[in-house]
Amino acid sequence: MKIVSFIKKENLKSWLEKISKVSTIYLPIHDKKKDIIDFLSWTDFIEKKKASKDDNDERYEINLIEKTKKSPKYIFFPPTEKLFEFEYKKDIDDPELVNIDLKTSFNDVINIYIGDNNKKNKVDKKIIFAIRPCDLSALKKVDIFFGEGDIKDPYYLKRRKNTIFISLGCNEPYLNCFCTAVEGNPFNFEYADMGMIKIEDGFAILKLDNKVKFLIEENKELFENKNLENKYREKIDIIMTKAVEKIINYWSGVTIDDIHSNIEKNFNLDMWKTISKKCISCAACTYVCPSCYCFNIRDEQKDLKGERYRCWDYCMNYYYNLEASGHNPRSEIYKRYRNKVNCKYNYNYKRSGQFFCVGCGRCIDICPVGMDIRESVDKICRAKF
Amino acid sequence: MNMEDRLKEKINNIIDELKIIVGYTKSNIPLRVNPIFIENKDEIKNLIFNNLCINNLATYAYTLSQEIDGKIGIILKSCDTKSIVQLISEELINRDKIKLIVVSCSGVIDYKKVKNSLSGAEIISAKIDTENINIKTIDKSFNLKIKDFYSDKCYWCDIYENPPIFDEFIESDVKLSVEKKLKYEDINEFEKLSLKEIFSFWQEEFSHCIRCYACRNICPLEVCKDRCITQLEEPHWQTQKITANEAKFFQLIRVFHLAGRCVECGECQRACPINIPLLKLMKKVNKEIERLFDYKPGLKIESKPPLLTFKKIEENIKEDKIV
């Protein structure tokens, strides 16, 4: 990849400030008091910073180095989302007749996704800054679920439209990262509109799509464009090879084909019971996962008024599988865990030719009882049926 | 012979009478340990026990006793036995079905505290002995003292040498040496805040909550996981919306469910992916229960939790307006 441009560390903030004026920009913010790093919009960041001014040390800070606690999927697929409101209205003349009144922005939503861009429906530009390549490829997988196929999800697509991704390469992958094992790479800028890499005193831009060139051209004074190859090429190459070397190859000798075919073949293995024995079937792994997309839709009503909303759901949930008859096909934890692994490595692979795991390692970081999906997949793949 | 070897030997002697043994084993992640389920003799070598064993394995007691026909062995720290006492006193598990292998504890390390002290640097590897933790990050190595990183619960622990219940007892090589804190010292301090401050504190904490139910599912005493009223479909008591208010509401239900039952093992707080200080809520309720009913959970098998029984007249509750 050619080095297109370069921005110094000290100029980054003023650049972000400038582009935050033309569009909503989301970036990873470290809440030092709670020790949580998550994507926040620039306006929220400034507001929170102002509100916490009483604290002696700076509580909120931009953190581009560490992995965010939650994945950025919640910007497009929020934990809870109102779909529409409804109200039952009785007909005064004919008491047997009840009408339903729908209050919805649904038409706007539909118009946007079929591409009717009149002024009223214009979607603001969103910039997701410093998204990791693994998180971005996970979003592309969520896109497949919501945006491809016969039925498309207008709510998701509305949020997803007009989004610019500025991806930051992963110089120091974590111990629990395994993106290279699932066809990823810490410097995969394939899906990014702009790809950056951090070198000691600034950020080199390695990929720049035509549609985002304006972000640099409008702020030319902040960027360097001369003699970049000589200055930085060597350093970048070193960083890249070091990063890839750091990722532990957990599944050595197991090919991608082995994984999905063996998981399918070993569906009835007793080993599923032993590997999932310690699982407590909570939602922590699902809710931090960048590629999990399951949701539940409910109507909630008080008197004659109510709303329909959708919210995240998780497959380790007992109620996730409960059928109306009262029968639960996955009443035991091992069955639910088996389904989860199959969903990530087998079912979706058959459907779209991709693993729905990007190897970000969040589920391993967060699990209170130390479930390790690498270990589970490894054991199942190597088991003899 | 050190404690770990003595533990292994003991397990080796008793494994024939047990169907399964729950213990600790090493993890892929530095400073962490994993639960392990041992069913035959050649797995015993994987057992470990050290200051990193913070998990409360009593979490698995109820489910295993339901699933497995036969006797179950559980390796517990002294403080974890309180959970078992509570489970037995509530008749949730049968005393005859479990064998308690209790290890007297010399304090456990809170890995979140260690991580915070390194200001964000990732721990590549960690080694511990009886006094020190040696940690390597990408570019540095640290030598930390174990005594600075004890879990909060260790500062209030008074049963590390004399567990209320056990079948086999293994003494540790090192004695726990912490400066004891006054009971409910932290809660008394927190109560000094104004109501408004307390409210905004919790509002802020729960605004991060993702309702993953890790706190509920890891709790040894919450045996109602799959029948929880916050998730029931019919009747639909609580909405599934993931918002700060709903999260708070769920947590309050949980707190009241554990009032006078919680043994303050701190697993909920440890399991919380976003570090909500849940133990504060638990302790507050326990403090009130102790004041009203003079009851401490997890110490005697014979005593009943006050909210599971009733007296005609409660000494500490004045009901003159009602009577």
Image (spheres, rainbow, N blue to C red):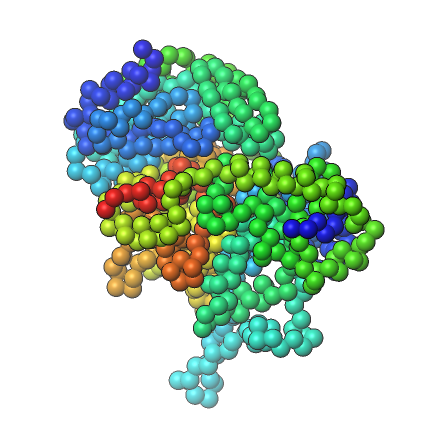
Would residue B285 be visible to someone looking at this image? Answer: no
Q: A129 or B293, which is in the foreground?
A: A129
Q: B193 or B310, which is in the foreground?
A: B193
**Spot occupied by residue A8 in the image (x, y as percentages of width and height):** 76, 43
Q: Residue at x 29, y 31 (%)?
A: B22
* Image: A144 above or below A25: below
Q: A228 or B314, which is in the foreground?
A: A228
**Spot occupied by residue A206 in the image (x, y as percentages of width and height):** 67, 50
* Image: A171 above or below B113: below
| Extreme residue toward the front, this view | A230
**Spot occupied by residue B258 in the image (x, y as percentages of width and height):** 38, 39
Task: Judge left or right: residue A219 versus residue B274.
Answer: right
Q: Residue at x 73, y 38 (%)?
A: A201
The quadrant holding residue B67 is top left
| Extreme residue toward the right, this view | A221
Q: A351 or A339, which is in the foreground?
A: A351
Q: Residue at x 38, y 44 (%)?
A: A254
Q: Residue at x 33, y 35 (%)?
A: B59
**Spot occupied by residue A228 in the image (x, y as percentages of width and height):** 75, 45
The quadrant holding residue B26 is top left
Task: Judge left or right: residue A317 versus residue B68.
Answer: right
